[in-house]
Image (cartoon, rainbow, N blue to C red):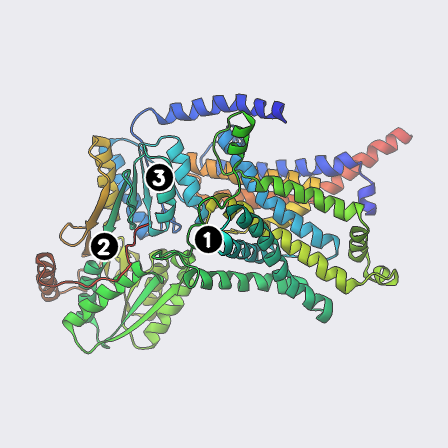
Amino acid sequence: MAAQKKLPFWADAILLPTLNLLAAFLVSGLVIWGLGEDPLEALSLMVDGAFGFQEGVGYTFYYATNFVFTGLAVSVAYHAGLFNIGGEGQAMLGGLGLTLAVFLVGDVSPVLAVLLAIVGAAAFGGAWAFIPAYLQAKRGSHVVITTIMFNFIASALLAYLLVGPLQRPGGQMPESADFPDGVSLMHLQDLFAMMGFTYESGPLNLSALIAVLCAVGVWFMLWRTRFGYELRVVGQNQNAARYAGISVTRMTVIAMMISGGLAGMMGLNELLGEQLRLLGNFTLGYGFVGIAVAFMGRNHPVGIVLAAMLFGALYQGGAELAFEMPNIQRDYIVLIQGLVILFAGAMEHLFRDPVERVFRHFSERRAA
Amino acid sequence: MTGFLRKIGATIALGVAFTTGAMAADFTPVLLYDIGGKFDKSFNEAAHTGGERFKEETGLDYKDFEPNSETQYEQALKRFARRKADLIIAVGVGYSVAVRNVASKYPDVKFTVIDAIIDLPNVQSITFKENEGSFLVGMIAAMKTESNTIGFLGGMDIPLIRRFERGYRQGAEYVKGDLTFIENYVGTTPSAWNDPIKAAEMARSQYARGADIIFSAAGPSGLGSIQAAKDTGNLAIGVDSNQNHVAPGYVLTSMLKRVDLAVYHAMKAAEAGEWKPGHTVLGLAEGGVDFALDEYNADLITAEMKAKLDEARAKIVSGEIVVSDVEGSNSGH
C-alpha cells in the first residue's frame, strides 16, 4: 500500500499498464519481424480485426464478457485473501449446471429455462468452489492447491458425461445435444434491431449486460456493504478480523462461493449465448486468463472490465491475424497473448520503480 | 454510447469495403484444418498437400486456418461464410455440427466437409472407407509379425476410429487365424489427437506386452507411436499421410487416406463450376484409401506379400471380400 502512495492515481492505473502493454507489443513486434512479416502491418491487422468493423467489435466484446466473469471471480476471492485458480473448473461445472437446467425445462418454457440456466450456472460454479473453500476454512488445505486440482476433476467429469450420458445421440464428439429451440440469450444485434438500428450479426449477447451488472454488483458489495467490508478485512488481516468478531471460516466459504458462482456464469456467454450446446472444452483457459485480467485491472471492477476488453481485443485481433497472415501460426498468437500477460502481470515492477524515481525526482525539484 | 457506436460504424464501412475488395478478386477457396494443425504429418497435412497441389496447378491461392479449439470451428466457418468465400472446405469429423449450423444459415455459400455427412443442399460430404485401407495394412501386419501379436492404437475413441480397427483386425485374420490383438485408445476428447507423449507410452507398453507391429490411427499422436517403434526396434504403421519417411526402416507402411485428393478435387470442381452437393464415399475402388509403398519401406514388403495384397485388393473392389463396418462411424446430423 505504501509503495502505491508514491504515485498519483493516474500513473498507477493508466501510465504503468500502458508502458507494460507497449513493452509487450515491442517484444511481439520483434518476434513477428523475425518471422519475416511486417510488425506494423500485423499490429494494424490486429487492431482492425478487434475494432475495425462491427462483427470484429462484437467478437471483441464477446470474448471480453468471458474475461469479465472470470476476472471478477478472481478478484472477489482475492479481496478475501484467497487465490482462486479454480475458475476454469468452476466455469465447467457452471456450464454443466446450465445445460442440466436447459434440458430439464427447456421443452416446457424457454423463458423459464433461461432463468433457471442462469441460476444453475451460478449455483453449480459456487458449489464446485464450496469444497475447496470448506477444506481451506476447516482443514487448512491450501486453496491454491485444491482449486487447481479441482480443475482436473471438473474436466474429467465433463469428459465422462459428454462421452456418456449427455452425448449427442449419434454424435462422435464430446458435445451434448442441441438446446431446445428458443432457449438462448438474445443476441445484441436482435436487441439493436428492436431499438431501431441495425448492427452486423455477431456472437455478442445479453450475457455481456449480465457481466456488467455483475461488475457493478461486485463493486457495490465490496465497497458499499457491511458484508463487503468484513470480507476485505478478512483479506487484509485475519487476526484483526477475528478480533473484531468476524467469522473467518464463514467469510472464506462465502467469498469462494461467490467467486465460483461468477466463474460459473461464464458459460452463459459461451453456451447459452453462442454454442447452444455443451462442449467438452468450452472454457479454453479463460478461467486462467481471468487471473491476469484481475491483476491487470488492479482487482477493481472498473479495471477488470477495461482489462477484459483489452484481452478480448487480443483474442479477436489474434484470430483475425491468424486468418489474414497464415505465416503467423496459431502458436505465435498465443505467444503474443502470453507476452502481454507476462509484462502486465509478472513483470509489473519492471517499470514501476523507474517511473517512481522519475516522479520523485520531479516532486523534489518542485519542492526545492 | 450511440455516438461511440456511430464512430465505430464509420470505421467499419472502410474496413468491410477493404476486406471484401481483397476477396472478390478471383476464385479463393478456404481450407479449415482440424485441431491437429496444418503440419501434423498426418490427416491435416494431407489436406494441406491437396490445397498446395491446387495452388501449384492453377496458380490460384487459397486461404487456410488452424483452429485453436473446438469453439473456433464455428467462428472460422461463419467468418468466411459471411465474406462469401467461394468454397469452404472443413476437414475433420469435429466440424460436423458447426458446418450444419453455419451452412443452414448461409444457404448460398458452398461447403465441403470431410469425414462427416451433412444433409443440406449446399454441403458436399466426403467420407472414406477407412476399413478397406485398414484391411490391407492389417494383412501386411499379419504377414510380417514374428510374435503373432499385433497392436492397434486409436486416437479418440469414436466409431470413426473403431472402423480403422475393425478393418485392420479383419485383414489380419484373413491372413492368419491365431493372432493376438492389443488395442488402446489415447483418449475420449479431441485432445487425444494431439498427445504424442501419451501415445508413445501406450505404444511402448504394447511392445512390452509382445506386439511387434502397431497400427496407430491417431493423427499427430501417432508420431509418438512411430517414435516408440524406433526406440524399441519394432515396427509401426502410419496413417492418413504417407509417414514412411518419418522413421525409415521402422515404419512398415502407412494406411493412406487420400484427404489430399478429396480437397484437390473439391477445389478443382468448384473452380470449374462443377461442384455438386451430396455424399461421396471414397474407397479402394475410387483410390480414396490405400497402403504406402515407397523407397523407405521397399525392403520391408516382399514381392510375395505384394502379390497377396493385390489379390485381396481386387477381391475387395469386386465385392468378393466385404470389409465390415462400424455402426454410426459416419453419422449425419
Q: CA distance from mark 2 to mark 1?
A: 31 Å
Q: Marks 2 and 1: which is nearer the front? A: 1
Query: How busy is the neighbourhood of tag 1: few (under 14 within 10 Å), some, or many (20 plus)?
Result: many
Quadrant the C terminus of chain A occupies: top right
Front one among A363 and A323? A323
Query: How busy is the neighbourhood of tag 3: few (under 14 within 10 Å), some, or many (20 plus)?
Result: some
Q: At 38% across and 69% down in the image, what residue appears?
A: B202
- Does any portion of residue B250 appear in the rendered image? no
Q: Which mark is residue B104?
A: 3
**Chain of the residue under label 2:** B
- Place of residue B172 in the rendered image (x, y in percent of width and height, measured from the top left): 19, 69
Q: CA distance from mark 1 to mark 3?
A: 20 Å
From the viewer's perspective, is residue A360 above or below residue B45? above
Please report whichever mark, 2 or 3, sits nearer to the chain's N-terminal start: 3
Q: Marks 1 and 3: which is nearer the front? A: 3
Query: Is mark 1 in CB contact (under 8 Å) with mark 3?
Result: no
From the viewer's perspective, is residue A287 above or below residue A215? below
Task: Check the image and name the residue furthest to the right.
Answer: A368
Q: At 24% across and 40% down in the image, what residue appears?
A: B277
- Place of residue A165 in the rendered image (x, y in percent of width and height, measured from the top left): 43, 63
Q: Which residue is mark 2?
A: B256
